[in-house]
């Protein structure tokens, strides 16, 4: 997942370099803006994916506990 986020961030980084260069900005400003966009985007996507993975893991652990209780049998059902 992290590799995909990093590669997507790099893609946006290079697209932003092209975009800001076509606007006629100085190279320092182009690189600074593109780097800022890269950092913000990769950080944001990483945090979203961490939250998504935690939600999926929590849901699967809850289902696993429920299934193991059903297999083992509860005292309430006996």
Image (cartoon, rainbow, N blue to C red):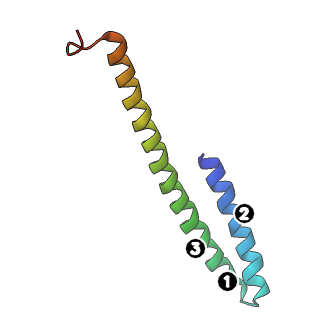
Which disc, if any, is residue 36? 3
Nearer the observer, 8 or 52: 52
Residue under the image location 55 percent in, 58 percent down: 45
Residue 61 is drawn in which quadrant?
A: top left
Q: CA distance from mark 1 to mark 3?
A: 12 Å
Which disc, if any, is residue 11? 2
Residue 55 is drawn in which quadrant?
A: top left
Q: Earlier in the sequence, mark 1 or mark 2?
A: 2
Q: Earlier in the sequence, mark 2 or mark 3?
A: 2
Residue under the image location 22 percent in, 8 percent down: 78
| For residue 51, above or below residue 19 | above
Q: Secondary structure at mark 3?
A: helix
Q: Position of residue 19 (x, y in %)?
A: 75, 80
Nearer the observer, 78 or 38: 78
On screen, residue 57 versus residue 14, left or right, reads left
On screen, residue 76 versus residue 63, left or right, reads left
Which disc, if any, is residue 78? none
| For residue 5, above or below residue 58 | below
The quadrant of the rendering that contains the N terminus is top right
Residue furthest front in the image: 77
- What is the crowding at mark 3: few (fewer than 14 residues within 10 Å), some, or many (at least 20)? few
Which residue matches tag 1?
Answer: 28
């Amino acid at each position: 997942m992290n590799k995909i986020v990093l590669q997507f961030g790099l893609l946006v980084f290079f697209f932003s370099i092209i975009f800001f260069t076509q606007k006629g900005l100085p190279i320092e400003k182009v690189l600074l803006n593109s780097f800022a966009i890269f950092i913000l985007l990769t950080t944001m996507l990483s945090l979203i994916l961490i939250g998504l993975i935690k939600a999926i893991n929590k849901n699967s652990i809850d289902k696993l506990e429920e299934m193991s209780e059903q297999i083992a049998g509860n005292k309430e059902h006996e």
